[in-house]
Amino acid sequence: MTTDNLQKQVAFIKEIDKLKYIQRKTKLFNSDRHENDAEHSWHLAMMTIVLAEHSDKPINVLKVLKMVLIHDIVEIDAGDTFIYDATKSHTNTAEELIAAKRIFGLLPTEQAAEFITIWNEFEDGTTDEAKFARSMDRFEPLLQNTSNDGGTWVEFNVPYQTVYDKKKAIQNGSTSIWNYAENLLNESVDRGILKKQPD
């Protein structure tokens, strides 16, 4: 049984290497190179460890780490959906659930069930751990865009209110990080890299 488990786990490990090829719209800090999903997940994991003290509620850090490392694996099959894409929903889709079942299904049964449960918990966004994980997921690209003179905001002409509405989910996990993020958004308007539409 142990050997069978190991073979399945190695197959999964090989499969998720594909995450390194999934390109995101956002670029690395102070860079013209696009970030890939694996880099994004690693960065969120490090952010979770470093910023956990700022969570509004006590959280199980290991569980949050699992969430941020697992949450984008479905994009191996489903692809990355740009958060500001107005033509496609950024919510949990049937396509992503099919991807989750296929990819996590490579693992031994109990592990597969755990990963799917953790992925669903992140997508639902209702537990304290999921709220903090989603805060990290929204915070990282904000930092990237401010370091890149507006980055995707400028490239895709995304107005301030749209960015604000997407980023305010940060406050569900951390009031202090949201306050910091909101200041960055206001500074971005002052710098001219994030445009407010006329009333």
Image (spheres, rainbow, N blue to C red):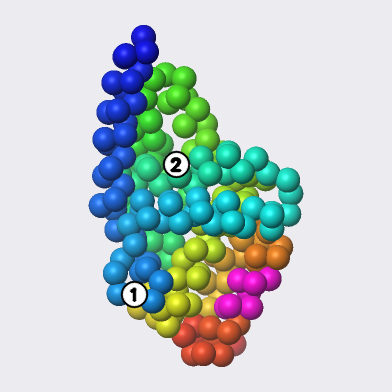
Give the Cα separation between the discs numbered 1 and 2.
26 Å
Viewer-side label of 1, 2 = 1
Which quarter of the rendering shows the C terminus?
bottom right
| Extent of the magenta region | 179-185
Which quarter of the rendering shows the N terminus?
top left
Foreground of the two, 46 or 196: 46
- Secondary structure beneath dot 1 equals loop
Q: Which mark is residue 31?
A: 1
Q: Is residue 122 above or below residue 37?
A: above
* Residue pictured at 41% horizontal, 72% vertical: 29
Q: Is residue 167 above or below residue 81?
A: below
Residue 181 visible within the image: yes
Q: Position of residue 154 (x, y in %)?
A: 40, 80
Q: Is residue 119 above or below residue 26?
A: above
Q: Position of residue 74 (x, y in %)?
A: 37, 42
Neighbourhood count class around disc 2 (C-alpha, 10 Å): few under 14, some 14–19, many 20 upward: many
- What residue did someone put label 2 on? 70
Q: Is residue 197 above or below residue 31?
A: below
What amino acid does circle 2 point to? Answer: Ile
Q: Which mark is residue 68?
A: none
Residue 87 visible within the image: no
Neighbourhood count class around disc 1 (C-alpha, 10 Å): few under 14, some 14–19, many 20 upward: few
Q: Position of residue 156 (x, y in %)?
A: 37, 76
Earlier residue among tags 1 and 2 = 1
* Residue pictured at 61% horizontal, 61% vertical: 170
| Main secondary structure type of the part rendered in magenta | helix
